[in-house]
Amino acid sequence: MKKQTKLIRIQTEKTQFREHSTPLYMTSSFCFEDAQMGKDLFDNSLEGNIYSRFSNPTVQEFVDKVCMLEEMEDGIATSTGMAAVYAGFAAHLQSGDHIVSSKALFGSAHQIITQILPKWGISHTYVNASEPKEVWEAAIQPNTKMIYLETPSNPGLELVDMEMAGQIAKAHNLIYFVDNCFATPVLQVPATYGANLVVHSATKFMDGQGRVLGGIIVGTKEMIEPVRFFCRQTGPSLSPFNAWVLSKSLETLTLRVDKHCENAEKLALALEGLPGVKKVNYPFLPSHPQYDLAKKQMSAGGALVTIELEGGFERVIKFTKLLTIPSLTSNLGDSRTTITNPDTTTHAKVSKQDKELLGIFEGSMRISVGLEDIEDIIEDFKQAINGSN
Ligand SMILES: *Cc1c(COP(=O)(O)O)cnc(C)c1O
C-alpha cells in the first residue's frame, strides 16, 4: 500500500463496539486480569499497556503513522516538540560529549544546546547551514557524538545538504539527528540520507489547525530504545486526547501540505520584485541561493516564505496594521496564514551579529502560508506593502 492509504488506514484495533472512527483511550492506567498478568507485564514477559506514561493505544496509533511516514522503525510521542528534542539529546549524550549542529535553529533548541547541555559538560560547535562539506567536517572533534540539524532553517530558509550530512555522520560514526518540522515527511524523508533520529513539533503541520501541542521522535529501534527509557522515567508523555487529534489530522497531512506549498510558491512569486520588498526567500524560487539543492532534496518548497521589507520596525508596524487577513502570531503550520517579525519575537534574544548571519533583519517577516484562497492573501499583502511604502 502507498503511504497515503496507510496514513488513513492505520488504526487501533476495533473494539466490541465496531466503531468506525478511531476511539480515544482517555485513561491513565490499564487493568490486569489477575495478579499474574500484572507481574508478567511488569517483568516484560508479557507486552501490553500498564500506565499511560509508558504507553497508550491512542498515542501508539499516532506514533505508528509517523514511523510509517518517516520510514523509521520505532518512536515516542511527547507533550511538545521541545520535549522530543530534549529527550533525543538527554537519552544519547553524556558528560564530555560534543555536538555539531546547524547554527540556524529553533530558538528553544538553541537555548538547550547553549544553556542547558553545558551544565552537564556537553559542548557544541555551530556550522552555518549552507557551508560546504569541508567546513562541516572540520567542526568534528574526537568526542563528537551527534550531528543535529534543521532544514529548511527558521526563519532564513537556508538548507543543509542532508546527503552530505549523512556521509559525514557515517564516516565519523555519529548519531544523525534531524528536526524535520518545517518540511514534514511529505516533502523530505531524512532517513533516506541515513538519519537515525528524526524529531517533529506535531504542534505545527501535523495538527495543522493550531489546536494542540505535541511532539514526536522516531528512529531506528536501537536509537529509540534509550529514548523510551528516558521518557518512561522522566514523563514527557503526550496526552491521549492530543494524540487522537493529531492522528486524525494526519489523515489530511499530505493534502494540506501540498496545498500549503502551492499557495506559498504563488505568494513568493507575487511578492518578489515588488517595490518596498527588498528580498523574498523561498526554497523553490530560482533566486534562492540553494535552489538546486532544494529541488534535489525537497519535493516542494514548503509553506514558509520569508520576506524582507524596506525600512525598519516602524515600517513593520505600519505594514502589519494594514494587513487584514493573516494572523499576527508566532505559531506556524496552521490552515490560517500566520505572520511574525522574527527580529522582535521568535529571535529577539539572538545577538544582532548572529541575526545577520541567520538572515534576520528589522524588516524580516516570516510568513506561514495557509489554506485560504491565495488570491485573497496576495491581494492583502500587496495593499499592505503599497500602503506602508
Ligand atoms: C515549534 C518548533 C519546535 C518546538 O515545538 P513545540 O511543539 O513548540 O515544543 C521545534 N522545532 C521547530 C523547527 C519548530 O518549528
Image (cartoon, rainbow, N blue to C red):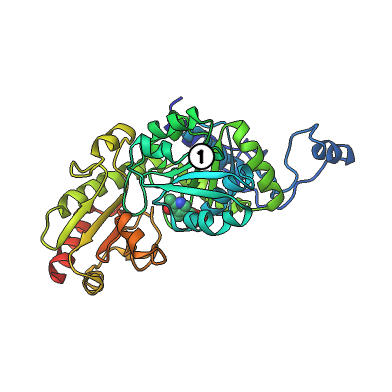
Question: Of all residues shown, which one is farthest toward the top?
Answer: 1
Location of residue 49 (image quadrant): top right
Closest to the observer: 19 or 277?
277
Q: Nearer the viewer, residue 309 or 115?
A: 115
Instruction: Tell whether circle 1 marks a residue whose Cβ is less than 8 angstroms from ligand 1.
Output: no
Taking the spot 34% from the left edge, 54% from the top edge, the residue there is 155
**What residue sits 18% from the left and 44% below the top?**
287
From this viewpoint, is residue 53 visible?
A: yes
Rendered residue at 20%/61% (across/down): 381
- For mark 1, does the 10 Å Cα neighbourhood hold few (<14), some (14 to 19), or many (20 or more) residues? some
Classify residue 20 as left or right of residue 165: right
Q: Is residue 246 left or right of residue 302?
A: right
Q: Position of residue 61 (x, y in %)?
A: 58, 40
Q: Which residue occupies the extreme right position in the image?
A: 35
Residue 14 in sight here: no
Relative to the observer, which residue lies in front, 310 or 324?
A: 310
Residue 167 % position (x, y): 43, 29
Where residue 140 appears, x then y in whole percent? 48, 39
Picture coordinates of residue 342 (x, y %)? Answer: 34, 63
The number of numbered badges drawn on the structure is 1
Viewer-proximal residue among 111 and 275: 111
- Amino acid under disc 1: Gln
Q: Is residue 94 above or below residue 336?
A: above
Local SS, label 1: loop
| Residue at position x 24%, y 70% in the image | 316
Q: Quadrant of the C terminus?
A: bottom left
For label 1, the residue is 141
Q: Is residue 291 above or below residue 236?
A: above
